[in-house]
Image (tube, rainbow, N blue to C red):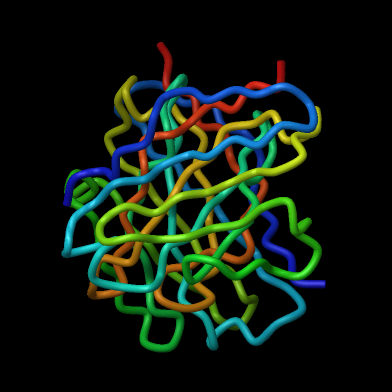
């Protein structure tokens, strides 16, 4: 059974950094790209970008350049999202999602709530 | 890339049918047969309900169906059940492995 298991909730102060993990299991990690999706409180799903799990090459959506970094550790089938210089507006649930074909997401992580508050 | 346009809400009584529209452009919905629909219950992971416009993943009831005409895709839920109450999002491939999501439709089962 394919699973994407994300790290737990985080409470951070403005200006800090956070790293969210997404561990994949029961499939060949490098066979499918991984995307990241954000849901801010009361808002809809917002696509953040994706990372090629073969090459490690990331691509970021508009609005997610600079402070957002996607990375991998293929030895443990894990994708990471790091956000630096956190702001209150980064408060959201962050999801990883497996790209089955043409940015169709067949499996999702359970979500990681990142709260930024002083 | 602008978000796809969905109605903010939809509703129906148990047993009835409801259709949710998703309007894009020729650069996304109209240009590719890669429209997906996701069901999202609060606090849970989104679930793929329809892919490639009208196909259902294993385990998704056939009460859920999808279609597309031009730049507008639709999700129809027939025989509404209480557990169908959720947020629904459309998504379309928009080139370069980029998707674009719809704005969200809150489906209420009356």
**Which of these two is toward me, B38 or B61?**
B61
Residue A20: x percent and y percent?
A: 52, 49
Q: Residue furthest top?
A: A118
Q: Residue at x 71, y 32 (%)?
A: B16
Residue at 37 percent across and 62 percent down: it is: A70
**Along the line of sight, which residue is nearer the eye, B84 or A13?**
B84
Question: Which sits in the foreground, A45 or A70?
Answer: A45
Q: Please state which of residues A55 and A86 is positioned toward the viewer in this rendering.
A: A55
Image quadrant containing the N terminus of chain A: bottom right
Up-down: is A30 above or below A51?
below
Residue B98 vs A62, above or below: the answer is below
Residue A14 image offset from top left, x and y in percent: 33, 22
Give the image location of residue B59, x and y in percent. Answer: 81, 63
| B69 displayed left or right of A26 | left
What x and y, as percent, mark residue B31?
Answer: 23, 71
Residue depicted at 40% across the width and 11% down the height: A118
User: In the figure, residue A38 lies in which quadrant?
Assistant: top left
Residue at 65%, 45% (x, y): give it: B45
Q: Is residue B16 above or below residue A74?
A: above
């Amino acid at each position: 059974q394919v699973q994407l298991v994300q790290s737990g909730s985080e409470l951070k102060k403005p200006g800090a950094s956070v790293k969210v993990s997404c561990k994949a299991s029961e499939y060949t990690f490098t066979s499918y790209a991984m995307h990241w999706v954000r849901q801010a409180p009361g808002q809809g799903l917002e696509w953040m970008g994706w990372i090629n799990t073969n090459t490690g090459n990331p691509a970021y959506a508009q609005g997610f350049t600079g402070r957002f970094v996607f990375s991998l550790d293929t030895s443990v089938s894990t994708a990471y999202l790091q956000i630096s210089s956190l702001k209150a507006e980064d408060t959201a649930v962050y999801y990883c999602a497996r790209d089955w074909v043409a940015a169709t997401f067949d499996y999702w992580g359970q979500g990681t709530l990142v709260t930024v508050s002083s | 890339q602008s978000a796809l346009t969905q109605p903010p809400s939809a509703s129906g009584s148990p047993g009835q049918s409801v259709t949710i529209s998703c309007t894009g452009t020729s650069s996304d919905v109209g240009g590719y047969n890669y429209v997906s629909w996701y069901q999202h219950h609060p606090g849970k992971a989104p679930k793929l309900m329809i892919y490639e416009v009208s196909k259902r993943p294993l385990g998704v009831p056939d009460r859920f169906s999808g279609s597309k005409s031009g730049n507008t895709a639709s999700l129809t839920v027939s025989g509404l059940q209480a557990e169908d109450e959720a947020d629904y999002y459309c998504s379309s491939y928009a080139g370069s492995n980029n998707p674009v999501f719809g704005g969200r439709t809150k489906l209420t089962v009356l």
